Image (cartoon, helix red, strand yellow):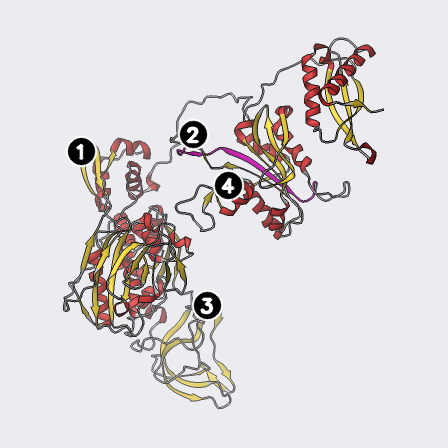
Amino acid sequence: MQFPESWLRTWANPDIDSQALAHRLTMAGLEVEDADPFAPAFSGVVVARIEAVENHPNADKLHVCRVNDGSGEPLQIVCGAPNAAAGLVVPLAKVGAELPGGMHIAPVKMRGVVSNGMLCSARELGLSQDHAGLLELPRDLEPGRDLREALDLDDTIYLLKLTPNRADCLSIAGVAREVAALTGCALHVPDIPHVPVTIPDRLPVRIEASDLCGRYAGRVVKGVNARAATPAWMKSRLERAGQRSVSALVDISNYVMLELGRPSHVFDLQRIRGGLTVRWGRDGEQLELLNGETITLAPDVGVIAGDSALESLAGIMGGQASAVTLDTTDVYLEAAFWWPEAIMGRPRRYKLTSEAGHRFERGVDFSTIPEHLEIMTGLILDICGGQAGPLDDQIAKLPAREPVRMRLSRCNKVLGLSLAATAVADVFSRLGLAFEQHGDDFVVTPPAARFDLTIEEDLIEEVARIHGFDLIPDEPPLAPARMRIQPETLYGLHAMRAEMVALDYQEVINFSFVEEAWEHDYCGNEQPIRLLNPIASQLAVMRSSLIGGLLDNIAHNAKHRQTRVRLFEVGRVFARDASVPDGDLSVAGVAQPTHLAAAAWGPAVSEQWGAATRPVDFFDVKHDLVSLLGVRAAGLRCEPAQHPALHPGRSAHLVLDGQPIGWLGEVHPRWAQALDLVHAPVVFEIDTAGIAQRAFPAPADLSRQPTVVRDLAIWVDAKLAWQAVLDTLEHEVSADEALAVVKDIKLFDIWRDAESGDQRSLALRFWFQGQDTTLDDRQIEYCMQRLTQALAQAHGARLRS
């Protein structure tokens, strides 16, 4: 929220300077992101009046002006501005002045005519980008007056970075309440004017949806002059708050919103047919908004409808059908309380930027609507004239203000303080919170503007803010130092991260909410978990896989000319699971396991002279996965299976010690092409719970006997998987004690030609080693015969001659 300090000090004027005030607000939780002067630094610029203008004798586009700078002697200034005219009051940079950017003003001769200064545009003073002509000042300003003082250009512009729970501070009044509570200065609340009712006209309004609108107030004002000029003081405050002046009626509505935190709307009464109905939208209804966009409504979007057309998108933006223009004479002023839940997410869904929606989705004071409408009506009558009708105020359903109990002992324990009950009572009184004291307990009834006070910790935070976070003693906690044993069987997330970094991967952290298309394309998830209030319209669902985020990261890096990318992420994924109960760390019906995913794209190794460049493949990433698993990799099985995100012939379901843990494979060419990648990345994703336990290291005697190596070539069916062959051999070894001397089995060659038909040759290598004695040929031959027979019986294998 942006606003000028001068506006704030009309409400609360503490005896501290601008920087100290900014510091106090920041330390109270209202972070002041910027506190800069309204105008950049310049000096020597005064108010001047042009007394006479003559054409330059030697230039068609230049004028020679006689200027009154208040010194008593007129100055001669050469000027090229098209709007230079006698009687105009403008800024004058006198000789010796310094302008923004370091420009120094000195007497100069322009086409033979001496110029003793410079008449300035707004851009030359750094006030705006307007340089079409001289900056025209109010004609009642006295020549010779310092421009910074005359226009209050040293006014500090504050930019607050508010947290979403502090909607009560999205106004001058709200910030002023905080300043008064923090500094103890007086809070100057403007009087509520009593607007005389001079006409009986009313506009009938019906609230059909009390879960959309809890309170609706409005009144008719006739005979207004929409072409009336917005007062300079109001226009100045709006501009310094970042608002563009539009017209008197619109400016008054924006002014009331910024000062009081009350979003409102002004309808052109003559363009409304019949009355107004506050209801939920209907499928397929369309509404043209004030910004010119036409949107299609849904049943969970509120509208204000006339008898023949939709008039407004409730709580967000008005409609074009009843928008006020400069020809408007009769208006209907509206202010309402819209339930935050009914507004949340709707502006982002339609990609709308709405000051009203920003406030209503956080919660707006529902108790002061009539008073604020009186103030708004008074401003309209003062500026635009007209006659006001009676104020209608309908209350359908308002939020209950449930009392919140805070224990003094709990407050002191959380804050590490020893505050007395009187000090806490003073804090609540300064904040304007109604409370009752029962012993050392405080029962606070939150005001209508404070939607953030619901639990005990909220009140403790209020005490800490007003007491001062910087006054809480900085004391280290005292506790006995106990050395804890690191469990050797636990494979924690930090250890997994360290291993992935050692494997040349870089960690990334992506949002847990993703595009819905990712869930459909990469996960085959047709019913993802939707967010009620997404931070962006495209990030509308929770992820059930980490793969989509990694692929997006790779595509981003590829667009920035990176040729080799290796990334990993550790994070939670979210999936529907009816068996999950509700708890402190879980949500009923939603499983939230922690996954680890990695993706590699580009060359297998960095470009170098010692190795040929080749793209990373399935087996490169499988090797990294095996390294991650460590000693447990012996129980890893890669079973051919299909996954929506992966190549159907280059993907595998990962099973560890009989339990499924994830997937490994090359990304489907369709998705690689959609991401504009020249070749497909290789990814894996595993459930960290499946690898979190490791076997306790057990020492074993090393054999001193020599190792014997034997090779075996066999013919098998071409479709037979190597894993099936290996399973048969390992089962045979475990079933016969005589085969315990078999220490390792490897596949080192696959051969097939045109004559082999539906068969292929596998070349296996066996390592044998005895524990206490050297193996002889008879033992080795026995082992080879047993293994060959097992393969023949299980798979019809035959020796290759």
**Which stretch appears magenta?**
586-604
Read off the residue under disc 1: 438
> How many marks on residues?
4
Asked if marks 4 and 1 touch (Cβ < 8 Å), the reply is no
Q: Quadrant of residue 390?
A: bottom left
Q: CA distance from mark 3 to mark 4?
A: 58 Å
Q: Nearer the viewer, residue 590 or 402?
A: 590
Cβ–Cβ under 8 Å for marks 3 and 2: no
Task: Kindly state the secondary structure of the residue where label 1 is placed.
Answer: strand
CA gap between label 4 and label 2 equals: 19 Å
Q: Residue furthest bottom?
A: 57
Give the numbered dot on residue 525.
4
Q: Which residue is mark 3?
A: 100
Return the x and y of residue 642 as percentages of the image width and height: 60, 37
**Label 3 vs label 2: CA separation?**
67 Å
Mark 4 vs mark 1: which is more N-terminal? 1
Q: Is residue 14 visible?
A: no
Q: Quote the CA–CA distance across marks 1 and 2.
A: 44 Å
Task: Give percent across and percent down for residue 529.
Answer: 44, 41
Q: Please report whichever mark, 3 or 4, sits nearer to the chain's N-terminal start.
A: 3
